[in-house]
Image (tube, rainbow, N blue to C red):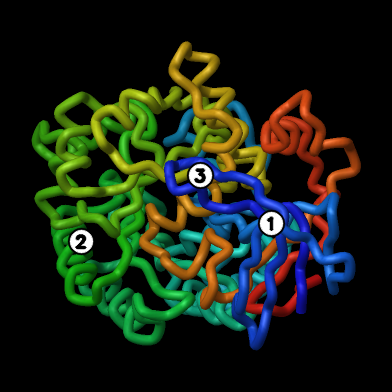
Amino acid sequence: MIVAGQLLIDGGDGHSILRPGFVRVDDGRIAEVIEGEIPRVADVGGEGFLVSPGFIDAHLHLPQFDMIGAHGMPLLRWLSDITFPSEMKWAEESYARDMTKRACSQLLSKGTTAIAAYATVHHRGARAALDVASSIGMRGVIGQVLMDREAPPELCGTVDRLLDEAKQLGESYPATERMAAAITPRFAISCSEELLDGAGRLAAEQGAMVQTHLAETQNECSVVEQLFDGRRYVDVYDSAGLLGERSILGHGIHLARSDLIRLASRRSVIAHCPTANTFLRSGAMNRSEWIDASVRLAVGSDIGAGYERSMVRVARATIETASAIGDDFPDAAAAWHGITAGNADALGWTDAGRLKVGSPADLLVIEPTIPWLGPMVDPLATLLWAWDDRWLKRTMLRGQFVD
């Protein structure tokens, strides 16, 4: 199959670039990427099309897709009043399975083909989510949430049981697979030190990705210090062995310079979630300060505190947030890179986020209905700011178009 158009290429410097060309897909993989010419006849696409790698979402919650829009509450109240009741429904395996199907369908309809996602504390529900996402063909990780305190009893487990269940998932879906299990303590408030320590050991044993939350709100940080004898949030995770280059920490807004230095030394990744931060009024990340400290960044929707399922809109929000607080803001080319090759690099995925020979053919065929290739405005800026989800005509997973 020949997919032709303006190719979204990794420019190699944290920016995406456009090049006319085509991608040849064979047996589910990218067989060729040819720049400089658009064939007159192609199976899909053409001169006015954008051909992009599938988008990557570095932080989201599958059980929260049905609660998008619960606005007006701070984080901890939002969890207790809205999130935890929603997650209790995943005790029913069939519900978890059906909801994962719906969530994946929504993600694919917006061009997201790879995810780093949270399930719930329910082992069978988490396994069902992994089964569904894997069968659909999505790339990524999904983790059973680990909690043993500061949550409803129905959502708390014992340390031994939770770690044993997480171990089982890691054995069924190892880190080397296209869809893998992640070690996912929700956040320090809901985890005892014993559970955090065990999670750190298990992640090291399995080479698994770690997902958790960090410093989303100031109140949250204060509660962590109360629960852990005055220690800083970053120190709690570091002592548990949860900071490393495969650690994805959601939000990371309220951090001191010493925290940033620690995170940079561990090569841990902060998943910047601008729409969720705005929605819950949690604060705004000073992105350039984090970059100056050499902290690695990714971009996540954080559904359902995040209200945008489209990663293009989330990328746009990174610019809007930085601009609103007077921070240096990324340009459009950097924003596009963030949700493709940038997120792939942050998550350690060499087989996603790029139009690269040998990689699985996870592609998007986009047909803007406005003039976008003219000389007046950078085409990538035009696409970003005028984005319309209806432009996405086809989504391909492993060489097959999905509905």
Say what secondary structure mark 1 lies in: loop
Alpha carbon of mark 1 to alpha carbon of mark 3: how far? 24 Å
Residue 226 place in picture, x, y as percent: 18, 33
Relative to 290, say whether 91 is above or below: below
Residue 156 place in picture, x, y as percent: 35, 61
For label 3, count other residues whose C-alpha is less than 10 Å away and answer few (under 14), some (14-19) or many (20+): many
Relative to 51, say whether 369 is above or below: above
- Mark 1 highlights which residue? 36
Question: Residue type at mark 3?
Answer: Gly
- Mark 3 highlights which residue? 338
Relative to 302, say whether 77 is above or below: above
- Mark 2 highlights which residue? 195
Alpha carbon of mark 2 to alpha carbon of mark 1: how far? 54 Å
Question: Residue type at mark 1?
Answer: Gly
For label 2, count other residues whose C-alpha is less than 10 Å away and answer few (under 14), some (14-19) or many (20+): many
The numbered mark, 3 or 2, whose residue comes first in the sequence reads 2
Q: Which image quarter is the N terminus in?
A: bottom right
User: What residue is rendered at 54% in x and 60% in y?
Assistant: 354
Q: In this view of the protein, which residue sits in the foreground, 380 or 231?
A: 380
For label 1, count other residues whose C-alpha is less than 10 Å away and answer few (under 14), some (14-19) or many (20+): few
Alpha carbon of mark 3 to alpha carbon of mark 2: how far? 33 Å
Q: Nearer the viewer, mark 2 or mark 1?
A: 1
Q: How many marks?
A: 3
Q: Is residue 271 left or right of residue 81?
A: left
The numbered mark, 2 or 1, whose residue comes first in the sequence reads 1
User: What residue is rendered at 58% in x and 63% in y?
Assistant: 355
Residue that lies at the very extreme toward the top in this rendered image: 326
Q: Nearer the viewer, mark 1 or mark 3?
A: 1
